[in-house]
Image (cartoon, coloured by chain):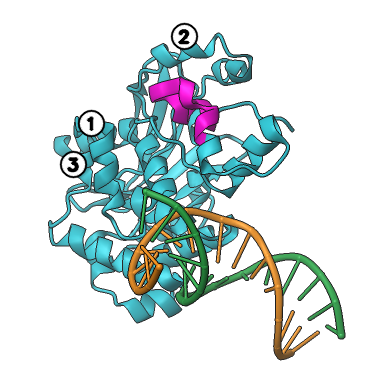
Chain colours: A cyan, B green, C orange
DNA sequence: GGTAGACCTGGACGC
DNA sequence: GCGTCCAGGTCTACC
């Protein structure tokens, strides 16, 4: 099955895909040569399928592989699939107001030329939160390893017609991201030692259990309409989510009022303006005048080499 | 409200 | 091969 989704213009598929590191984290898979993005997706109905996304005129083309090809997607499942892809690629995002401001800033001209500003998102906010916690206090290689372990140990396999799937997707053993329910059944010792999450294990477990028990509705935060400061408070209430992680998650939700300040941000700001070590407050101050767009200005800034 | 120390992993380095 | 040091955010206890 193949269909096309239109995007609010301007739009460049590759700019969304390469907006940050999520594309390197399973179940995303990028075929570099063609720029084709794969994602092993779970629909709300529980059905698993492989999706293949690539640039198309005016938007994106989506192909699907069904492990059970004899059973077509229902109308509801097709609608769900389209909605999820629109969310993941921010197809409806309007950055016109920011682009107008950015035109006055030479350090953001490349961003405008490349039509950057959208960020790649996971279909569920639960997955975005888990992955963000995995980025904290560790190196990128370790983040990817922890995520890979989670998917391999707890993600459901798209086995179906395995051989057919393997000729279509350039990698084997495709699995969807673990559901909160599946992770909630695990225990801290397993997550610590086998999944190698270390001290993050109780955070991920608590998060999964509170989502699985419906005590916490993370998906409701996607289009909540809450003020950004209130949204930030809700995110900071999650164990393992501090200032950096909350700002990162706010950007994923389309709120750019805060900067995800990490050690890299301090290095970049130091190199750009100070030539001496800077702290979090100085990073914030450097972008303060961008107001509600400061996260975007920071993220897509054309830093000195 | 601010600060210090613990948390945990894996890579780099010296021996 | 082994031991040590270090980087990376967040939490908690303490002042």
Numbered range of the magenta stretch: A284-299
Q: Quadrant of residue A64?
A: top left
Instruction: Tell me the quadrant of the picture where the C terminus of chain A can be found.
Output: top right
According to the image, label 2 marks what residue?
Answer: A100
Q: Nearer the viewer, mark 3 or mark 1?
A: 1
Same subunit, tags 2 and 1: yes
**First of labels 3, 2 by sequence position:** 2
Q: Which chain does the numbered disc 1 sit on? A: A
Q: Is residue A1 visible?
A: no
CA–CA distance in space, label 2 to label 1:
23 Å
Whether residues under marks 3 and 1 lie with C-beta atoms below 8 angstroms apart, the answer is no
Q: Is residue A303 above or below residue C5?
A: above
Assess disc 2: are there few (<14), some (14-19) or many (≥20) residues with their C-alpha within 10 Å of its C-alpha.
few
Q: Position of residue A212 (x, y in %)?
A: 18, 61
CA–CA distance in space, label 3 to label 1:
14 Å
Same subunit, tags 3 and 1: yes
Relative to A200, is A142 on the left or the right?
Answer: right
Q: Which chain does the numbered disc 3 sit on? A: A
Residue drawn where x is 50% and y is 47% of the image: A29
């Amino acid at each position: 099955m193949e269909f096309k989704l239109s995007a609010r213009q301007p739009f460049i598929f590759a700019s969304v895909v390469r907006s940050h590191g999520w594309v390197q984290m399973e179940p995303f898979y990028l075929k570099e040569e063609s720029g084709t993005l794969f994602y092993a997706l779970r629909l709300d109905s529980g059905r698993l399928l492989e999706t293949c996304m690539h640039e198309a005129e005016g938007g994106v083309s989506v192909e699907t592989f069904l492990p059970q090809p004899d059973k077509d997607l229902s109308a509801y499942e097709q609608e769900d699939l389209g909605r999820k892809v629109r969310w993941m690629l921010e197809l409806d995002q309007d950055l016109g107001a920011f682009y107008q401001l950015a035109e006055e800033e030479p350090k953001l001209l490349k961003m405008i030329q490349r039509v950057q500003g959208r960020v790649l998102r996971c279909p569920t906010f639960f997955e975005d939160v888990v992955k963000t916690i995995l980025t904290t206090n560790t190196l990128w290689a370790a983040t990817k390893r922890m995520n890979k372990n989670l998917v391999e140990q707890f993600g459901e396999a798209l086995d179906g017609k395995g051989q057919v799937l393997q000729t279509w997707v350039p990698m084997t053993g495709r699995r969807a991201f673990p559901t909160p329910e599946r992770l909630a059944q695990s225990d801290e010792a397993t997550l610590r030692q086998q999944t190698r999450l270390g001290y993050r294990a109780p955070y991920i477990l608590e998060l999964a259990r509170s989502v699985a028990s419906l005590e916490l509705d993370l998906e409701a935060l996607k289009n909540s309409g809450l003020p950004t400061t209130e949204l930030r408070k809700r995110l900071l209430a999650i164990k393992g989510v501090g200032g950096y992680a909350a700002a990162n998650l706010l950007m994923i939700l389309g709120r750019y009022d805060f900067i995800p300040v990490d050690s890299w941000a301090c290095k970049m700001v130091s190199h750009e303006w100070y030539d001496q070590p800077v702290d979090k407050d100085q990073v914030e101050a450097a972008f303060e005048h961008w107001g509600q767009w400061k996260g975007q200005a920071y993220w897509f800034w054309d830093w000195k080499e």
